[in-house]
Image (cartoon, rainbow, N blue to C red):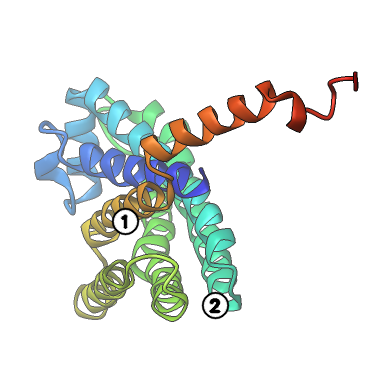
Amino acid sequence: MRDRAMGVLFILSGVCFIAAVVNPPLLPTWGGSVPEVVRTASAHRTAWFTSTWLIALSVVAGVAAVELLSRSLDTDTARVGRSLYLAGAGLALASTIYDLSVTSTLLGAARLPGWYLGAEHWAEGLATAYFALLAPAAMVCFGVSILRTRRFPRWAGVVLLIAALTLFGQFAAFRGALPFPQFLAFIALGIAALMHSLAQAPPAAAKVELLRSGRRHDSNPQHNPDRPAD
């Protein structure tokens, strides 16, 4: 049951983030300047609010999934990964809350105030710390734990490590990161968790036979302790 819930949460986190980023009206502005992003958001308010809330949902679902993953792996390395991810998620949510509470009030403004441009770069720095540093560091911990414990298929651990190295490489080259590798890896890990859950579940035929056996046992007076003796 835990693996199934974890798998659904990881997939939800990945799908929500990808849906937020590929939102057609906003897609060309990712990585653009702050004034350009705000102008586009002003022209497409519904799309901007939808994407921002989807990113927030993605982060929250990821936190829940990581908590379940840490409990499932039950290693010190996984617990370190959970701490790193929770710290990064807190920064990402702070950045998102800033957009929802501050940026939203400036949509449609003729001119952006100077203080906002500086504060927005600070908020973007919080998100970068999550996407490019803390989240991939956590993914390394989880990937290593999966390879050591074999709690899930080894390929799931390899996918997490490759995604983490890709994110670190982006940050080293560009001082930023496009987080697609993280959330594609989350989807892959979610699928692995669901596959593992299905593999551990007893076949339907076995469940039916077990139920029938229990009914026969209850109906047999010789094996029914609650039936009074003659």
Q: Residue 198 location, x and y as percent? A: 36, 47
Q: Secondary structure at mark 2?
A: helix
Q: Can you say whether 33 is above or below 81 in the image?
A: above
Q: How many marks?
A: 2
Q: Quadrant location of residue 71?
A: bottom right
In-image side of 94 versus 153 (left or right)? right
Q: Secondary structure at mark 1?
A: helix
Q: Residue 212 location, x and y as percent? A: 52, 28
Q: Amino acid at mark 1?
A: Ala
Q: Can you say whether 50 is above or below 14 in the image?
A: above
**In percent of the image, x 50 and y 58: which residue is there?**
69
- Tell which residue pokes out farthest to the right in this image: 229
In-image side of 74 versus 88 (left or right)? right
Q: Residue 8 location, x and y as percent? A: 38, 41
- Tell which residue pokes out farthest to the front in this image: 230
| Residue corresponding to mark 2 | 77
| Residue corresponding to mark 1 | 192
Res. 51 in view? yes
Ranked by sequence position, the earlier of labels 2 and 1 is: 2
Q: Nearer the viewer, residue 142 or 174?
A: 142
